[in-house]
């Protein structure tokens, strides 16, 4: 159960990806602690739209943002500070490039750590 209204709003943005990547509750709870701005919320919405357009409706060509290319993601983001935090879950759940791109833009508090990997 989520008691905090802001976390509930963040859950609405994450929901599609929680289901798609079968992210366990403990990790979800840690992700929901992260606040994000309107730009990140819009990026979540756009990425969900692209997944629906491509996988549910078969529209559009191959979009590299929807794929998990481990080597490309590592080479593109490995030096980013947020990759040091999220790298293990990115690899474990094979997050797509579009989701990784969103995670790399989060402003992470210095006290935050993702423990449940």
Image (cartoon, rainbow, N blue to C red):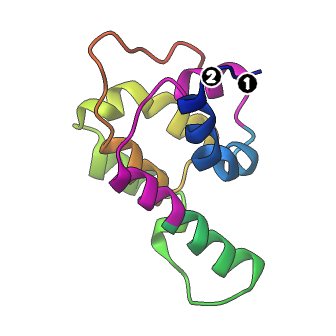
Question: Mark 2 falls on what kind of element?
Answer: helix
Q: Residue at x 32, y 9 (%)?
A: 111
Q: Residue at x 43, y 60 (%)?
A: 42
Q: Residue at x 28, y 52 (%)?
A: 76
- In the image, residue 31 sits, relative to residue 105, either above or below, namely above
The foreground one among 82 and 109 is 109
Quadrant of the image occupied by residue 84? top left
- In the image, residue 59 sits, relative to residue 81, either above or below, namely below
Location of residue 6 in the rendering, given as x and y in whole percent from the top left corner = 53, 31
Location of residue 30 in the rendering, given as x and y in whole percent from the top left corner = 55, 21
Question: Mark 1 falls on what kind of element?
Answer: helix
- In the image, residue 110 sits, relative to residue 20, either above or below, namely above
The label on residue 25 is 1
Tell me whether the residue at label 1 lies in contact with that at label 2, contact meaning CB atoms closer than 8 angstroms: yes
* Prevailing secondary structure of the magenta residues: helix
- For the magenta stretch, what is the residue range? 23-45
The label on residue 29 is 2
Location of residue 7 in the rendering, given as x and y in whole percent from the top left corner = 57, 30
The label on residue 98 is none
């Amino acid at each position: 159960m989520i008691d905090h209204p802001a976390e509930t709003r963040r859950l609405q943005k994450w929901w599609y990806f929680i289901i798609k990547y079968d992210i366990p509750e403990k990790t979800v709870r840690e992700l929901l602690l992260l606040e994000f701005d309107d730009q990140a919320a819009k990026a979540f919405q756009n990425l969900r739209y692209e997944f629906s357009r491509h996988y549910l409706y078969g529209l559009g060509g191959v979009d590299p943002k929807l794929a998990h290319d481990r080597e490309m993601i590592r080479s593109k983001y490995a030096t980013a500070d947020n990759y040091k935090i999220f790298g293990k879950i990115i690899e474990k759940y094979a997050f797509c490039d579009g989701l990784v791109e969103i995670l790399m833009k989060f402003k992470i508090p210095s006290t935050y750590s993702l423990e449940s990997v």
